Amino acid sequence: MQGLVGLKVTFNWEGFVPKVTRSLRRYCSLITAFSAVFFTATPVSAQDYQLSGPNAPVRAGYFVVEASQSQSAATADLQLRDLQLQQSVSESFDDAKYYHFFGDFSELTVTGVPSGNYFLRLVDSAGSPRSNIIEVRVDHYPLWQALTLFFIGLILFVILLITQLYFFIRNPIQITNEVKHE
Amino acid sequence: MNDAGFALSTELGLWLVALFGLAWIAFGWYLGRANKTHEDFALAGRNVGMALAAATAMATWVTSNTTLVAPQLTYQFGIWGMVGYSFAALGLILFAPLAARIKQLMPNGYTSGDFIRLRYGRAAWWAFIVISVVYAFGWLVSLGMAGGILLQALSGLDYHIGMSAILLICVGYTLFGGLRAVIATDFIQAVIIIVGVVLIAWFLIDTVSLESIHTELSGEHPQLLDLLFPAAVMFLFNNIFFGLGEIFHSNVWWSRALAFRGKVAMKAFLLGGLLWLPIPIVTGFIALAAPQLGIFPPSADMVGPMVAAEVLGKVGAIVVFIVVFSALASSLDSLLAATADLVTRDFYHKKFKPQATDAQLMRMNRYSIIGLGVLTWLFCLPQIATLGALLNFAGAFVASTIFPVVLGLYSRRIAGSYAALAMTAGTLCGLISYFLIGFYVAALVSCAVSASLCAIGLWRGKVDFDWEHLAEREEA
């Protein structure tokens, strides 16, 4: 459902400062990319796959990474299932973790990730990079906010239990087994 | 595994759908022969006994939520996702005394809409109907989507074909059999679900040890085992209130309370809740094994079937298919029947044609089932969200009904205007929090706002409602 909202304005919890997300960022990225093509003369090396991930910081420790085959790919027959997704906290990919795409799917959900900045790219069996590098920032909600909501929920639940118990005791059930039909 | 990495071939997936579809539709037709009146069709003659009642309560609550979303939330939120999901059993358990009260106050009632209309009046009824319709479609669409996702995950069958097939089958047998067929198929489906889930968990623990799962998670995915995982801590009570809101307001459960015989309702819901409690623990646990098996699904809601199929191979994939298909069907048919009752009773009969004959009501009920099926299919065509996100969007709506329903059933003092305000403001605040914070707080915020307004309504209430108004009689 969130995907239906075009230009979404969200608030960050620390101070409720409004920030414009997704669409505006995409427009800015497009303009930046456009400028890069026209105003710089640096040659861009061809990649087999283009990786994309979440633009905004991830607040719940899981995110989806999508790989799409570049049109300029040198080896069009290189299948995604032959590659591995490499993830590391350093841009030099020391101490990396590896994930495999399932079946013919081109998306992969990474989960259970602690707060921090993560770099991801696709590599082949020889360890050669086969995609661009993306950076994903994981920033969990502060614990005090989570615990505040937890205790609000607990209090509300206890109130509901007491209410139901109170009325249940005061109103004994009187039902006959006969069905009343008109 | 075939070449594309799927546990079943596409042809086998299609054959399984066709075989099960034909079996359920034939069974629905067989049971539907006993329906002579609209009351038979909509409420199974108000004469459902204990065994069928407990089984239908449990089986209806075992749905795509339990078989696909419980693993999804465990994959996303770890231990809390699994345990928190099982707390949705509280919905059935706490509804048990309400079901007895409903049966006592409304011996001739048909729908939850009837109750809101008679107890709170027109404004609250409109707020309630909007909530019910949004929820019913959210759930129907999520079930249709789950069917497509299931077949795609297991056999690579195109999402649209799987989704269309499951909708067609459920519409088919609900159309022929009404609530009688729904409850009877639920009984068989409940047995299949319990046996299948136990089998899958048994094989999983046998294949992948608990120790290796724990080592993998604590090393590579530590948040999943963290009891102070912030988003998961937020999610816990949100899920409880979502479950309570779903059951307390939905005509799926009210129609069952009214259909169960005499004093059966309370015991049946209690037993159904207790039977349901361990199921999300088992289905959720399946997702915790995914990283150990090197399975990282394209969408978190596909993790359950993928892990089961990976561990159990082709036979396991068939077991998973049968279990999830049964779970989907048992909920989809119930929701189709209950929402069609709501359309027939609350709109057609009460608003447009009060003099409608029994035959006309029955015909309208069947048209409603077909119409709902077609609409659901249209909404399912674009796969707009993950199942969890879609369901929790509805949480913002349904959690606002918890306190108005409970207080409306027991207290004479709360007025309709406060109930209407509580449901409307609760829903709006829940939606705002859904978009500003996340799906894991929407129901909690909605319920908190609604409860506060109901408390004010009770405190300032001067109404002395006469319970006799609820025992509405039909025109002869």
Image (cartoon, helix red, strand yellow):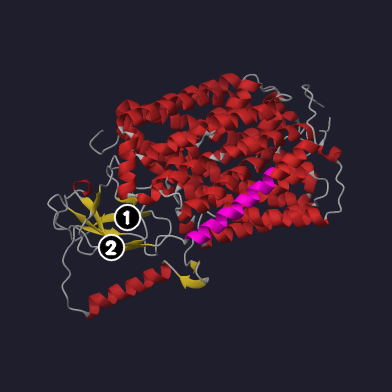
Residue shown at 29% from the left, 39% from the top:
B293
| Three-letter amino acid code of the residue under disc 2 | Ile
Query: Do circles 1 and 2 both sit on a common chain?
Result: yes
Q: Secondary structure at mark 1?
A: strand
Label 1 vs 2, first from the N-terminus? 1
Residue tagged 2: A134
Question: For the magenta stretch, what is the residue range?
Answer: A143-161
Q: Is residue A128 magenta?
A: no
Please state which of residues B395 and A137 is positioned toward the viewer in this rendering: A137
Residue sticking out furthest to the bottom = A39
Which percent across, then down, holds residue B476?
A: 84, 29
Please state which of residues A80 and B288 is positioned toward the viewer in this rendering: B288
Label 1 with label 2: CB-CB less than 8 Å: yes
Q: Is residue B340 visible?
A: no
Reply above or below: B254 against A52. above
Q: Are there few (<14), some (14-19), or many (20+) residues within 10 Å of tag 2?
A: some
Q: Is residue A144 magenta?
A: yes
The residues bearing labels 1 and 2 have C-alpha atoms spaced at a distance of 9 Å
Reply above or below: B428 against B375. below
Q: Secondary structure at mark 2?
A: strand
Residue tagged 1: A65
| Three-letter amino acid code of the residue under disc 1 | Val
In the rendered structure, the answer to whether residue B385 lies left or right of residue A77 reads: right
Reply above or below: B313 against B234. above
- Callout 2: chain: A
Please state which of residues A50 and B26 is positioned toward the viewer in this rendering: A50
